[in-house]
Image: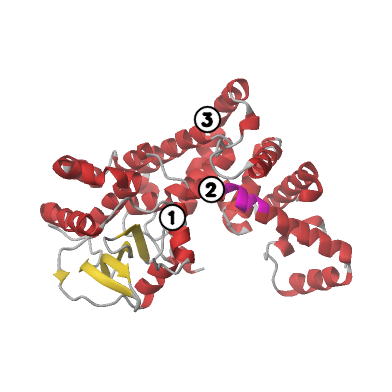
Amino acid sequence: MNPSKEQIAAYADGELEGDPLRKVEAAVAADPDLQDQVDAHRALRARLSAHFAPVAEAPVPERLFRAVGSEAEVVDFAKAVRKRVKPFAPRFTWFGPALAASLVVALVGFSLSQSGAREYAEGDIATALDNQLVATQQAQAPVRILLSFRDEKGRFCRGFSSEAQSGVACRNGRGWQLGKVFGGKKPQAGEYRQAGSAEAEVLTAIQDLAQGPALDAEGERKAQRQGWRE
Amino acid sequence: MALSEARADTFEDGLLAMLPRMRRFAAGLTRNLPEADDLCQMTIERALRSRAQWQAGSRLDSWMYRIMRNIWIDEGRASTRRMQTFVDTDEGLGMGSSGGQEASAELNDVDRALAKLPNEQREAVLLVMVEGYSYKEAAEIVGCPIGTLNSRLVRGRDALMALLGESA
């Protein structure tokens, strides 16, 4: 078999299956020149990904957060929140866009039931706390990380939200210790009426714990590399 | 793919979470960060106006990318002309703060090479090789048959490899 350029590219991209895959695979294995082409395709992909990675990791400008909010209920909400929290504003300024984003996200769907249990994150939530970075997580990830920061003991803490549970967790020797925990994201009628108190809970939780600015993309990557330990 | 079944809890939630990736794709299309942010903003505004057309449960990201590339095609000509006139494309993405001399020299090589591709080849390359879409998903976003996508991709890659030389 003499694979076409298209077939070689599709093979390098993992797009082939079944019979075509076996044929191209055999041809590549038998011909070092074809193997070089496959390698070149993969090297190019790696180079392009690396080239654009900094854009996805850079802070998102405030105006884009505002654009998302401009026609949605959520936004009126977020605006109202910002106005209302003015008195504490200086403590929040260093969170910048990360907090703005997390606020909007956090406000969208917290239900208000707050359990007092101080335990450890488990399952999907623990996995997300360990592995997910704010800058690169998938839009559809079942557990979303809102932002990361250090508490007064220097521990790494992360705000998260999921269907089952939302809140703040801090890493200690045993795992991700849950701090303030709220119910899952269950948008429901009447939620907006109570928003003031939900938002206050989220703000207060972070405000009480955070010591210094939220981690940026690089800070998060570093923290993750060291296993979220100080 | 599990992703296609999952969806964000709310529309705005989904948009917010997608902003970093949207900026990356926009930066690839426009090759200029301020213009990329303009494109993101237009995309968000159009998406909010057209949100009734988005089917809850379908992939929000593909839908957003389709909107973005359509705006880029519609509005791209005027802004491309503006960019070529006023912006030195050698400046690349203007992500200058990261990396030393060598890193930024390489950034510029890739930017310059991408700038030489026809739009249809560049978007195919970006969707598959940077955004990680399958050929099928990329073809749906662009609105062309898979075979067409595949051949645009190959031509774009050949051109890039030639432009970037052995270092690719």
Q: Which residues are magenta?
A: A47-52
Q: Are marks 2 and 3 in contact (CB under 8 Å)?
A: no
SS category of the residue bearing label 1: helix
Q: Are marks 1 and 2 in contact (CB under 8 Å)?
A: no
Residue A166, numbered label: none
Q: How many marks?
A: 3
Residue A54, numbered label: 2
Residue A219, numbered label: 1
Mark 2 neighbour class, 10 Å CA radius: few under 14, some 14 to 19, many 20 or more: some
Question: Of residues B73 and B80, which is closer to you in this image?
Answer: B80
Please provide percent x and percent y for residue A27.
Answer: 85, 69
Q: Amino acid at mark 2?
A: Pro
Question: Of residues A216 and A43, which is closer to you in this image?
Answer: A216
Give the residue pinned by disc 3. B75
Magenta stretch encompasses residue A145 = no
Seen in the image, is A112 located left or right of residue A141? left
Please provide percent x and percent y for residue B70.
Answer: 52, 39
Question: Of residues B106 and B125, which is closer to you in this image?
Answer: B106
Chain bearing mark 2: A
Above or below residue B116? Residue A32 is below
Of the two numbered discs 3 and 1 in the rendering, the one whose residue sits closer to the viewer: 1
Q: Amino acid at mark 3?
A: Glu
Of the two numbered discs 1 and 2 in the rendering, the one whose residue sits closer to the viewer: 1
The answer to whether residue A137 is visible is no
Residue at 56%, 38% (x, y): give it: B96
SS category of the residue bearing label 3: helix
Please provide percent x and percent y for residue B119.
Answer: 65, 38
Residue at 34%, 38% (x, y): give it: A67
Chain bearing mark 3: B
Whether labels 2 and 3 belong to a single chain: the reply is no
Q: Secondary structure of the magenta portion, mostly?
A: helix
